[in-house]
Image (spheres, helix red, strand yellow):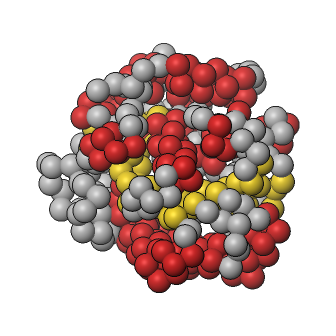
Amino acid sequence: MSESFRNRNTLLTGHSGFKGSWLCAMLSREAAHVTGLALESECAETLIPLIREAKLLDREIFADIRNSEACIQAVAETKPEVVFHLAAQPLVRRSYRDPLETWNTNVIGTANVLEACRQCPSVKAIVVVTTDKCYANKERVQPYRESDRLGGHDPYSASKAGAELVAASYRDSYFRETGIKIATARAGNVIGGGDLAEDRLLPDAVRAFVRNQPLVLRNPQATRPWQHVLEPLSGYVALAERMLTAPDGGFDTGWNFGPNAEGNASVGDVAEKFGHLWGDGKVECLKNHDGPHEAGLLQLDNSRAKSLLGWSPRWSLDEALRHTAEWYRAWYEKGDVYGLMQRQIEIYHQQLPTK
């Protein structure tokens, strides 16, 4: 990171979530003036106390992005130059249970945030975080490029494709005229300490392991692009910086932030590796899984971010899993998880990118 964020008013939606917590820590190291906007957390376990104790935010606003007036008020009061929009309903299986919540949050919520930005003259750059699942997945071997068709089978994936369309519409209809730069960011399957959500592989693994129970896998053969949370976050920050410092550079478009080829691995392989790192984690597979559809194969092409942004992954899958296991151990043993986050950020920034 550079001096680009020092003393800049920055709005971070979804600051209370997994990625948002780490992005708070990254931006605070650069002396950005960060306001967090999110719902009160539904989880019994959350990183909000850590964020507050470490004073990572200048201000915290609890509001629902589905409420347009609340978004307009929050942005108007904050007067941000940079907006990172991470707030979302991020779970595939939850989207099957409650599709309207998912569509309202991920599509209408995104439109509300962008409309609030449109009405705020201070805004210069916006990064809308979507997902690798925003592509129309044909289960093909070739990694998806930014120019591939958007789509989505499940409500979550489709809603994130919808968020991409909302961002593109605001770019073409309003922001090109006003000079606001907006880009979308599509990351792979993100792992790392601090993910405490339901229905995620490694948080589910840790919850099982600490109870001396096996982790039960639904789709062990499903292949995903796995990466540590610091990988895409460094891409989001680099992207925002480029839009701030090179406003005519053509960076206001969609970007993939995925791992290199070795980061593409099956759910079963990742679970087995993590169980070994934990020490005594056991893994089992369901014999008959009749749950809702989940994609079997998904990979991202990261060559564009490498060539045009100068961004590249720094940690291998094994390194990402090791740092993740280290964090969860510290969390459940009541260790200094914030100090560990800071050390991992420092290690990450000191390590050279992998090719």
Quarter-wise, where is residue 312 in the image? top left
User: Measuring 30% from the left and 71% from the top, which residue is drawn there?
Assistant: 151
Look at the image and tell me in which quarter the N terminus lies: top right
138 versus 308 height, above or below: below
Residue 245 in view here: yes
User: Measuring 25% from the left and 55% from the top, which residue is drawn there?
Assistant: 145
User: Measuring 39% from the left and 32% from the top, which residue is drawn there?
Assistant: 313
- Percent coordinates x, y for residue 267 in the rendering: 33, 39
Residue 203 or 290: which is nearer the viewer? 203
Residue 314 or 95: which is nearer the viewer? 314
- Percent coordinates x, y for residue 269 in the rendering: 30, 31
- Residue lying furthest top in this view? 279
- Percent coordinates x, y for residue 215 in the rendering: 44, 36
Quarter-wise, where is residue 162 in the image? bottom left
Look at the image and tell me in which quarter the C terminus lies: top left
User: Measuring 39% from the left and 43% from the top, which residue is drawn there?
Assistant: 309
Left or right, residue 70 beside residue 277: right
